[in-house]
Every structure is written in C-alpha cells, then in structure tokens.
C-alpha cells in the first residue's frame, strides 16, 4: 500500500456538501477544494546570485513586490510572495519532487532553503460574482478591484483564521490556502457566509 | 483598533500584529559584569513615556517580519514606521521617539 492510497485531504469527505452549497447566476458563489497542490517554501536573498538562477529554473522571476504572484514555466508554477526573502511555490499535484530538485540545484551553495510544505495547507477555491462579498464578511483587507486583483496575494485573517489569499481570476475567483486543522472551521464559516446567496435578494 | 502600516504589506488591522515592547533595548556588551540588579533592569525595566514611544511590532498574521514603530501613547497616532530589514528600501537606521 502506498502513501497515495492512504492520503486524505482535509475536505475530501465534504466535496458533495461544497458542491450542493455552490450556486450559479448573477449572485452565485462556488466553493470547492483543490487538494494536494505541490507547495514548496523557498527562502533566499532576493538579490543574490541564486535568485536569477532560480528564476531561470522556474521559468518565472521571483516576485519582489510584496504580496504579488508570478506564474509560468512548463509546470504552470505559481510563486507567491510571503516575505522579503520568502516565497511559496505552488504547482500541480505530484510536481513537488521535480520542482524541489530544480530549486535545490539552482540554489547550490547559496544560503537559503527549499522545504516541501505540501502537508501544511490545503486549498479552497471560492469563485463567482458574489465571492468577494463572501470574503468581505470576515476579512479586513480591501478586496475591491481597484486595490486587489488577479496576481495579488496576501497573508491575512479570514474569520479569525490565518489564510494565504490569492486572487486567480477577475470573475472574481480566489484561492485560500489554509492549515489542515483549521479547514473544517473555515469551511463551516464560508458555507454560512455563502448561505444568503442561495436565495433571491430581499426586496429593497 | 490601530491601523498599522506594515513596511511590507501596507496598512493592516492591529489584530494581525504581535507587540514586542520597547525598541532599541541594547544587549549589554559584557553581561557577566552586570550585577543582578543591573541584569534585572536590562531584562524587565522599560520606559513608560506619555508621548512618542519607539516599540517593536511583528506582522504575525502576515509577512511575519519585525519592524519598529513610533506610537504616541496618548493619541495612539503612529508617527513613524521602520522595517530594519537588510533588504528593505528604507535602510537599517533606527527610528527613535
């Protein structure tokens, strides 16, 4: 028996519930889990010689502007800014060993680290015309398109839970990276926040 | 609620931050030469000004970096923010009250 047959995502048992609570239409909002994304925590000096080698290896530069995301490369990797010398590299399920190998080779002897943090967090995807309104019920960030849009990320609190918030589409669509043990709570909170959008709006 | 401008992430709620006490408390050059009283003074005794106060904050729920803030202890107005991080654009000179 391999690890693949044993592994469970934090929300695997709730996929049907998430689908049942998702709605379409003008005020629709959809929630689903994107389980088992490859996640690598990368730390190094942003202006050292290794940063350029890593940009070449990944096929995309490391974002140096705070709270931004770059994407690219053959594996469709996304690199999220987490700190002035820390990034999170996201890739499809199963890509972690290859990408980690590339990063370690590019880092070589420079001070820094590449750590597989794939077991840290799972990913929730919240999308639809009402997605921003759902988040705004529990997040103090200004998520209006004039401030926050595709290609932006932020580490913040949503419903008191630490999340990495990443806008992936202007629809809007967001990805929320959340610690496994907080996932059930945050999902309950989101389903409650989404509830009103399953019904017609109250007359003004 | 304070609105604190993290040098990296911009203005965020106070809830996202962790307070680190008075800034610029220098570690004694020769700790073993200190008397118990002087050591206790270094460890525990802090200024408590009525007015501008330089203090440490960490953006605990965000980028997790430490930085210095000068806050007016009466009005809570934030007078200056300084990252102290070696890669920061604003250099490493300390802010003082």
Image (cartoon, rainbow, N blue to C red):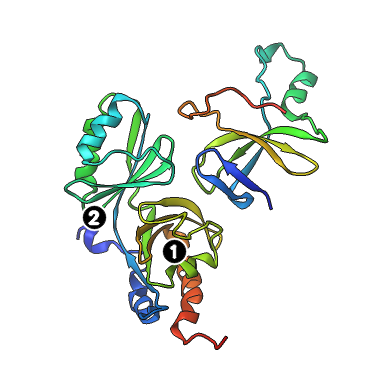
Q: Quadrant of the N terminus of chain A?
A: bottom left
* Pointer 1 or 2: first along the chain: 2
Residue A153 lies, with reference to residue A158, above or below; the image says: above
Q: Position of residue B2 (x, y in %)?
A: 67, 49
Residue A10, visible in the rendered structure: no
The numbered disc on residue A92 is 2
Residue A168 lies, with reference to residue B21, above or below; the image says: below
Q: Quadrant of residue B87?
A: top left
* Callouts 1 and 2 in the same chain: yes
For discs 1 and 2, the disc positioned in front in the rendered view: 2
Q: Chain of mark 2?
A: A
Residue drawn at x 49%, y 65% as measured from the top left: A135
Q: Which residue is mark 1?
A: A183
Q: Quadrant of residue A171?
A: bottom left
Give the side of residue B64 with respect to residue A79, left or right. Answer: right
Q: Quadrant of the C terminus of chain A?
A: bottom right
Give the side of residue A82 with respect to residue B16, left or right. Answer: left
**Label 2 crowding class (10 Å Cα cut-off): few <14, some 14-19, many 20+?**
some
The residues bearing labels 1 and 2 have C-alpha atoms spaced at a distance of: 20 Å
Label 2 element class: loop
**Label 1 crowding class (10 Å Cα cut-off): few <14, some 14-19, many 20+?**
many
Residue drawn at x 38%, y 37% as measured from the top left: A64
In depth, the one of A165 and A146 nearer the eye is: A146
Label 1 element class: helix
Q: Chain of mark 1?
A: A
């Amino acid at each position: 028996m391999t690890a693949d047959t044993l592994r469970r995502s934090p929300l695997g048992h709730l996929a049907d519930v998430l689908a049942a609570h998702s709605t379409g239409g003008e005020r629709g909002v959809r929630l689903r889990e994107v389980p088992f994304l490859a996640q690598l925590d990368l730390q190094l000096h942003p202006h050292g010689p290794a940063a350029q080698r890593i940009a070449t290896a990944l096929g995309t530069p490391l974002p140096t502007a705070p709270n931004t995301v770059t994407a690219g490369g053959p594996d469709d990797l996304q690199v999220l800014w987490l700190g002035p010398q820390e990034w999170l590299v996201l890739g499809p399920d199963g890509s972690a060993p290859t990408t980690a190998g590339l990063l370690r080779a590019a880092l070589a002897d420079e001070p820094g680290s590449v750590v597989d943090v794939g077991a840290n967090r799972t990913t929730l995807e919240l999308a639809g015309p009402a997605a921003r309104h759902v988040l705004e019920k529990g997040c103090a960030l200004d998520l209006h398109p004039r401030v926050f849009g595709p290609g932006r990320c932020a580490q913040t609190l949503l419903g008191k839970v630490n999340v990495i918030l990443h806008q992936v589409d202007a629809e809007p669509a967001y990805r929320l990276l959340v610690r496994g043990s907080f996932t059930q709570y945050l999902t309950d909170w989101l389903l409650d926040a989404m509830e009103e959008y399953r019904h017609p709006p109250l007359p003004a | 609620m304070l609105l604190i401008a993290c040098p990296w992430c911009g203005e965020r709620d106070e809830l996202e931050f962790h307070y680190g006490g008075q800034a610029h408390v220098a570690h004694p050059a020769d700790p073993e030469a200190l008397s118990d009283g002087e050591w206790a003074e270094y460890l525990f005794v802090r200024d408590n000004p009525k007015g501008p106060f330089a203090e440490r904050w960490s953006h605990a729920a965000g980028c997790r970096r430490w930085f210095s803030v000068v806050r007016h202890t009466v009005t809570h107005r934030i007078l200056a923010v300084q990252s102290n991080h070696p890669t920061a654009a604003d250099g490493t000179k300390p802010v003082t009250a």
